[in-house]
Amino acid sequence: MPETDEELMRRVAKSHDGQAFRELMNRHQKLLVNHFIRRGVYQEYEDLAQETFFKIYKARKRYRTNASFRSWMFTIAQRVWIDHLRKSGRRKTREDAFKQEPQPAFLSTQPMQGHDLYWALDQLPETHRDVVVHAVFDQLSHGETAQILGIPEGTVKSRLHNGLKQLREIFNTENPA
């Protein structure tokens, strides 16, 4: 039976187990890359995922053995994302980033499809987008999302409700049935 993420991280924290860390990276690389793409990173998403893993390894001794690895990983990814925004010199809006590097799927005259979700996410306010990405796409609980974003759980629920409502409106406007 494969070890859980938490068991692997305990091995990394205790004995600097490189094989266990590689297994964690293999399990979560794609998840982190997709996480950063959903946040509007269209070029450096792999770099940010690698930086997240670097910081996880560097902070391995601070891992609480009773904590969810995914929640801890996304907390670190959130800090990497904020650092990325700071390093860019100014907070670029996702709309600006989208205009700089349009994706071929978004240039289509065909009705919106599932892969246009990134475009739809770009239309949400950042506060709602962050909650939707963590709670829906990263499949974190409301409590974990609240902890990562540093907001109350009730705020997560409210923003999630409003964000999903806005996404429905965006899809209904762009692709009327």
Image (cartoon, grey):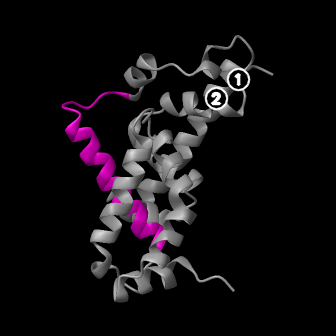
**Residue that badge 1 annotates:** 112
The foreground one among 49 and 155 is 49
Magenta stretch bounds: 69-93
**Residue that badge 2 annotates:** 116
Q: Is residue 86 magenta?
A: yes
**Please, which residue is most extreme toward the top here?**
109
The foreground one among 37 and 154 is 37
Between marks 1 and 2, how big is the CA–CA gap? 6 Å
Q: Is residue 21 magenta?
A: no
**Image check: 108 left or right of 124?**
right
Please state which amino acid type lies under the numbered disc 2: Asp
Residue neighbourhood size for the residue with mark 1, other residues' Cα within 10 Å, grouped as few (<14), some (14–19), many (≥20) = some
Tell me the quarter of the image containing the N terminus. Answer: bottom right
Tell me the quarter of the image containing the C terminus. Answer: top right
Instruction: Report x, y in % for residue 132.
Output: 52, 47
Residue at x-position 64% and y-position 29%: 116
Instruction: Report x, y in % for residue 72.
Output: 40, 69
Say above or below: 99 vs 33. above
Tags 1 and 2 in contact by the CB under 8 Å rule? yes
Residue at x-position 42% and y-position 76%: 18
Say above or below: 38 vs 94. below
Please state which amino acid type lies under the numbered disc 1: Met
Residue at x-position 56% and y-position 22%: 103
Residue at x-position 29% and y-position 55%: 79
**Please, which residue is most extreme toward the bottom here?**
14
State the SS at label 2.
helix
Instruction: Report x, y in % for residue 110.
Output: 74, 15
